[in-house]
Amino acid sequence: MQKDTFYTQEQLVDGVRANDAAILRWLYQSQYPKVRKFVLDNNGDEDQAKDLFQEAFIAFWGNIKDNKFQPENGSALTGYLYQIAKNKWLDFLRSSQFKKTVLLQTEHDKIDEEEDNDWMQYRTLVATEINNLGDNCREILRRFYFAKESMELIAKAFQWTEATARNTKYRCIQRLREKVKTQIKS
């Protein structure tokens, strides 16, 4: 299977559910490089990238087979796999296991990491503050930004009108911005 092969979201979902080897291989080959780059750019190594991708792929595969995820747009499925991997890596970075690891670095590595450090800290702060927002806000933001669900679908899930869902999402984003600003200032 060539890397430039294009599958529709329906073909990908059906292929994952049917354990189609060509589809699974295409997903692995097309998505692993993105996850690898993310892990390597964020204090990981090659082995960690491989392990993480395997874990993410298994979770992704299980969620698709159990109908826990339905793609909403042309890149939703591959974005979902990447998001699972990214969240797993960020969880690892926040874990005590990572904090106990001693990293050996050259001076060149330190300079590169210092440039990326602020961005990584900001992303970690945002992820932490999202978790502190409360269940409704966290779920709305997850559904809208990560699962790429429409406001109509989110409103139905919460048994709200679309206007209520939109207003609630707006208030959640505002609260998140304020919390992040407060944390940055302190």
Image: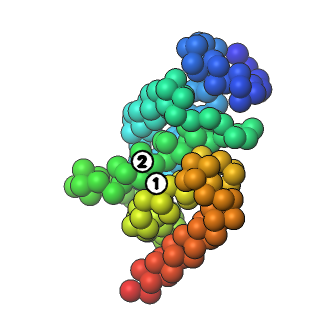
Q: Amino acid at mark 2?
A: Trp
Q: Quadrant of the C terminus?
A: bottom left
How far apart are the two marked residues, 1 and 2, measured between alpha carbons? 9 Å
Q: Which residue is mark 1?
A: 42
Q: Nearer the viewer, residue 44 or 31?
A: 31
At a point 58% along the width and 21% down the height, the residue shown is: 16
Tag nearer the camera, 1 or 2: 2
Quadrant for residue 4, please give it: top right
Pointer 2 local density, CA inside 10 Å: few below 14, some 14–19, many at least 20: many
Q: Is residue 139 above or below residue 24?
A: below
Quadrant for residue 94, please give it: bottom left
Q: Are marks 1 and 2 in contact (CB under 8 Å)?
A: yes
Q: Amino acid at mark 1?
A: Asn
Q: Which residue is mark 2?
A: 89
At a point 63% along the width and 18% down the height, the residue shown is: 15
Pointer 1 local density, CA inside 10 Å: few below 14, some 14–19, many at least 20: some
Q: From the viewer's perspective, tell me whether residue 160 is left or right of residue 94.
A: right
Secondary structure, mark 2, is helix
At a point 48% along the width and 76% down the height, the residue shown is: 180
